[in-house]
Image (tube, rainbow, N blue to C red):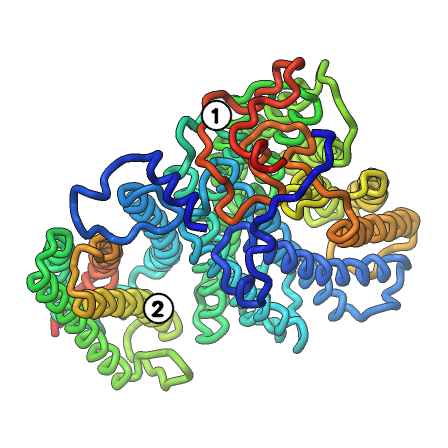
Amino acid sequence: MTSPTSQASTSHTQSHSATGHLPPVAMQFDDALQQHDACRLGMWLFLSTELMLFGGLFLAYTIFRIAHADVFAEASQHVAPGWATVMTALLLTSSLTMALAVQAVRDGLHRRATVCLLLTMLLGGGFIGIKLHEYHSLYAEHLAPLFGWPFGYSGQQDASLAKMFFVLYFFMTGLHALHMVIGISLLCWIMVAMIRKRDARRWSTAAEMVGLYWHFVDLVWVFLFPLLYLIRPDKWF
Amino acid sequence: MTEAIVPPEHHYLNDGYSARSWLLTTDHKRIAVLYLLTITFFFAVGGVAATIIRLELLTPAGDLVQSETYNKLFSIHGIIMVFFFLLPVIPSVLGNFLVPIMIGARDLAFPKLNLASWYVFWIGGLFTLWAVVVGGVDTGWTFYTPFSSVYTNTYVIATAAGVMIAGFSSIFTGLNFIVTIHKMRAPGLTWFRLPLFIWSMYATSVIMVLGTPVLAITLTLLALERLTHVGVFDPKIGGDPLLFQHLFWFYSHPAVYIMVLPAMGVVSELVTCFSRKKIFGYKAIAYSSMAIALFGFLVWGHHMFVSGQSVYAAVVFSMLSFLVALPSAVKVFNWTATLYKGSITFNTPLLYALGFIGLFTIGGLTGLFLATLAADVHLHDTYFVIAHFHYIMVGGTVMAYLGGLHFWWPKITGRMYPEVWARLSAIGIFIGFNLTFFPQYILGLQGMPRRYHVYPEEFQVLNVLSSAGASILAVAYAFPITYLLWSLKYGAIAPANPWNAVGLEWETTSPPPTHNFIEQPVVDHEAYNYAAPAQDSPQPIALESTAS
């Protein structure tokens, strides 16, 4: 069972030795380099599916934003651009710590990697925390038209159209937040695995992939922020 | 090769017999077999619905089922057949089995993801089957809004969830194929030495990866409208019903090419093998696959000519739809040019391939009628459309799938199928298919709308012909299921290369070992090296010596 693997990998005589403890090479790959390349291509492809997923949503948002411009402008005054600015800052900083974490894992700097991963998770957690606070205050204002909760919109514009803004707001930011939660879980998994094995480099590919994912989720927020919060900011907090 | 054929001692099928060794396998070949069983099951479910539909349409009156039941029947037939049979059938069964072997790899790049795709597929399937059992869905497979999101009282959300979940299995498969084809080709196997089946799998995977997420978000928005009663698609409360159709067809038209591109790949393999000739215009076929994948994303509006979209958009979509016909025609010309002056043997796989070429041509040409703006206004939503896409989907995809299944059956199972029975059933399917669907073209031209179970009496003769054809088709489909099962025990032991074909999959044993090859194959020639007639087997590299 093992013989074809070993025979095949000797026919491709590259890498393995130079960098020490690279991630273990799975049976189907010839060497660590091929495995790493395959993982990276796979991740980019996955991110392209994510792009198409959010793309459909952004298209729908754009159409309604144009069709009901005044309604969306008025309804958007009920969300808090100030908090969203803080969230944006947290998230952009987390991208920095994520990038540092990936580099640290690759260099086998165990302690620095752990600290950076932890910081990334904390910043991401802060983002989620503010998000939940925002959700709660919208719920308290009866502006969360979900699960049959009471919805009461008092403004110049048509309430049923304003409801569309809030449904899209909750759906888009909710889908984004779900991605954040998945990202934090993945970071947690890498950190625990790294601490248990005391060997950072084994996780270098995994960390790089989660890093790509994290930056992508970050980028989605960069578009969500102006679309949902900065239409006609009135009160900032 | 005529000496007693001894099956290999170790192969993927006897590498463990426990349920666990199958259900938790990461071997792409075993996952292909799991998919084969699953897909056949869903084909049977969709087929039962089709049978009742054809029985109902025997008479002009609605005497077998009520209108509501009939609506549910054609919805179930469409949803199961499109999302749980046609879309996955060739990629998940033949593609899963062949992609790594054809490129000389030990497995796909992400074997666990591959297994996950099978489980995800089943979760999606169970959602949909549950919806069918508890009450069904009556929206048609297209889930058009606002009917689906506001008015119907059937199980739209469960069904849509099932379709969406199954979509993720398709994304997993496509992603796996792209990475595998990019990164794991055997030494010497350059892009233009790849079998054309691999090219078509690659093109298909691109559509799967880029299209399917859009379907997922569309169905989610549909569920959102149903749950929150906010106007995403319902025009009465500010939504846009055309947005649904745009988003839906942005995926679902390319999805047509997810169904037919793999079939074209199979046919390319079959035609060149059974005419013992190098394929005509290798690069043209390879590029045309990619062109179809690209153009396929630009033509969705031809489903919406009478929906009220802008006339200018319709004109552009019409023109682009004609463009898709070009790469498709390139392929048909190349296959026929390959057959020309070849030394043809009419084995079962070639019979299916020839059936494909004929039926696909008819289906494709009638597609041009529908891409013509003025003609479509008359033909839209008539049986002409039904006949057109069944010629592509059933006459095309299913024929090619069966051809490919017969061609690679010895490789998959290590047994030969009974040739006489197989030829009979191939001819039976061809006759039954044409008798079922050709009358529907005429019905459509005469104006019989789709989705009605009561029709004027003058349409009865053609409907009876169609139902009669369907019964022949049903029997002919039962044949392969029976004799292929029979062959597992009683079929002749298959040699490594029963067709004397070229390609890496024929250089390993039948069935292949768990890691596909005993020795890493090295490729130093182009695909379809059938040129030298004196040499009846092109340099078997690895296994011939160890197998016999």
Q: Nearer the viewer, residue B523 or B294?
A: B523
The residue that label 1 is drawn on is B193
Question: Considering the image in quadrants, where does the N terminus of chain B appear?
Answer: top right
Residue sitting at x 90%, y 50%: B468
B215 or A162: which is nearer to us?
Answer: B215
The residue carrying mark 2 is A171
The percent position of residue B533, horizontal first and vertical second, equals: 66, 14
For disc 2, the chain is: A
Q: Amino acid at mark 2?
A: Phe
Instruction: Kindly state the secondary structure of the residue where label 2 is placed.
Output: helix
**Mark 1 residue type:** Arg
On the image, the x and y values in percent for residue B39 come to 64, 56
Q: Are marks 2 and 1 on the same chain?
A: no
Image quarter in which the C terminus of chain B is found: top right
The answer to which of B121 and B56 lies nearer the viewer is: B121
Say left or right for B487 vs A116.
right
Q: Is residue B236 above or below residue B187?
A: below
The x, y position of residue A76, in whole percent, is 24, 68
